[in-house]
């Protein structure tokens, strides 16, 4: 299975980049994890939030195939415990899913088209975080899911 984290924009913080890389390096090789930073929409400050979300959707689609599972990381998505999230990953692996794309949208979230296209929506918290921090939290949760599935002592209930 291949796991992609698709993000709008780049991370400027060297500290966050380093921590994301730390967890990324610890992920199992058979997950074929890839973090893709999609460049920001040009002239984003000069267009409406709705148009910006539509333009970002066009960019996301360039990295996705129709057969992929698409999961939006969205504040209104479903909440999972770490064990439940690990179980979701395990289900996809055992169902021979080829690729799962987790998407982190821009500052205004996702367009209606992306919400319709998504197979699922997951919320990492009811709180709001920067898009850069979400990358770190998400990659750590992937690592935690791997440790749970391997029954290693990283996760404590």
Image (cartoon, rainbow, N blue to C red):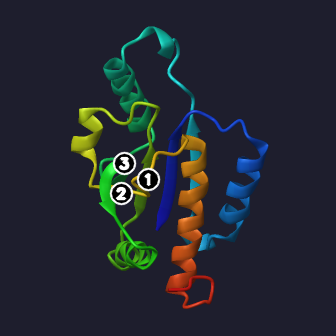
Q: Give the image location of residue 106, x and y in percent.
A: 46, 33
Q: Nearer the viewer, mark 1 or mark 3?
A: 3
* Mark closest to the chain's N terminus, 2 or 1: 1
Q: Give the image location of residue 80, x and y in percent.
A: 37, 68
Q: Give the image location of residue 5, x and y in percent.
A: 51, 51
Quadrant housing residue 67: bottom left
Against 85, residue 46 (above or below) is above
Which residue extends farthest left?
Answer: 116
Quadrant housing residue 91: bottom left
For this rendering, which residue is in front, 82 or 92?
A: 82
* Mark closest to the chain's N terminus, 1 or 3: 3
Pointer 3: residues within 10 angstroms few (<14), some, or many (20+)? some
Against 152, residue 86 (above or below) is above
Pointer 2: residues within 10 angstroms few (<14), some, or many (20+)? some
Q: Is disc 2 in contact with disc 1, using a CB cutoff of under 8 Å?
A: yes
For this rendering, which residue is in front, 100 or 84?
A: 84
Q: Is 16 on the left-hand or right-hand side of 94?
A: right
Label 3: state its secondary structure: strand
Residue receiving disc 3: 75
Q: Is 39 on the left-hand or right-hand side of 91?
A: right
Q: CA distance from mark 1 to mark 3?
A: 14 Å
Label 1: state its secondary structure: strand
Residue receiving disc 1: 102
Q: Nearer the viewer, mark 2 or mark 1?
A: 2
Residue receiving disc 2: 122
Label 2: state its secondary structure: strand
Q: Give the image location of residue 54, x and y in percent.
A: 33, 25
């Amino acid at each position: 299975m291949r796991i992609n984290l698709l993000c709008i924009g780049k991370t400027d913080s060297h500290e966050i980049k380093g921590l994301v890389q730390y967890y990324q390096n610890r992920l199992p090789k058979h997950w074929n994890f890839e973090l893709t930073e999609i460049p920001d929409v040009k002239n984003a400050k000069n267009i409406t939030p709705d148009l910006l979300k539509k333009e970002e959707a066009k960019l996301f689609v360039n990295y996705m195939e129709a057969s992929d599972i698409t999961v939006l990381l969205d504040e209104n998505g479903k909440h999972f415990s770490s064990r439940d999230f690990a179980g979701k990953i395990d289900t996809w692996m055992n169902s021979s899913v080829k690729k799962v794309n987790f998407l982190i949208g821009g500052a205004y979230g996702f367009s209606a088209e992306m919400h319709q296209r998504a197979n699922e929506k997951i919320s990492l918290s009811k709180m709001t975080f920067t898009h850069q921090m979400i990358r770190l939290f998400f990659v750590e949760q992937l690592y935690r899911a791997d440790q749970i599935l391997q029954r290693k002592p990283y996760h404590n209930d």
